[in-house]
Image (cartoon, rainbow, N blue to C red):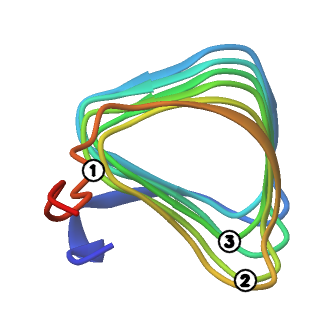
Amino acid sequence: MSDRSNLSVLGPSTRLTGRVTGKGGLRIEGCVSGDINLSGPAEVADGATIEGELRAESLDLGGSLLGNVTPTGPIVVRAGARLRGEVKGTEVAIEPGARVSLRLDTAFELDLGSTKR
C-alpha cells in the first residue's frame, strides 16, 4: 500500500470473529474469521489469515485468504501468500511463489495484433 499512515491495524495477537466494517484502510496482522467491508485499502501481512469475504478499495495480500475478494482497485498477491476463492477485479498481479486456487472474474482487452495473414 502506498500510504500506511491512514491504515488501522489489527495486530499479530488479534483473533477476531465477526464482521469488520470501516471507512478507511486496514492492515491485518492477526486472524479474522468473518466478512470485511472497507472503503479504503486492505493489507494482509505475512502470517495473517482471513476466512471470509473481503470488499475493499484494493488488496495487498502477503498472508492467507480463504474467501471471495471484490476490490474496486488493484489486487497484489505476494510471493508466499495463499489465496483461495473467487476474485472480481480489474487489475490482478500474482507474484511467483504465491499459491492460488481461484476463479477470476474480470474484464480486459486482449490485443491479438493484426488479423491479416
Identify the residue at horizontal 27%, vertical 50% (top origin).
Answer: 110
Residue 51 position in % (x across, y down)? 83, 31
- The answer to the question of whether label 3 and label 2 lie on touching residues, with beta carbons closer than 8 A, is no
Q: In this picture, is 64 found above or below 40?
A: below
Q: Residue at x 30, y 32 (%)?
A: 107
The residue singled out by tag 1 in the image is 110
What residue did someone put label 2 on?
Answer: 79
Q: State the residue position of label 3.
A: 62
Q: Residue furthest front?
A: 117
Q: Residue drawn 81% across and 83% down? A: 97
Q: x%, y% of residue 34?
A: 74, 19
Q: Is residue 31 left or right of residue 40?
A: right
Badge 3 density bin: few <14, some 14–19, many ≥20, Cα 10 Å: many
> Which element is circle 2 on?
loop
Q: In the drawing, does residue 8 fall left or right of residue 108? A: right
Tell me the residue at 33%/72% (across/down): 1
Residue 10 located left or right of residue 92:
right
Q: CA distance from mark 3 to mark 2?
A: 7 Å
Residue 73 in the image: above or below residue 32: below
Q: Amino acid at mark 2?
A: Ala
How far is mark 3 from mark 1, CA to CA? Answer: 29 Å
Looking at the rendering, which quadrant does residue 50 occupy? top right
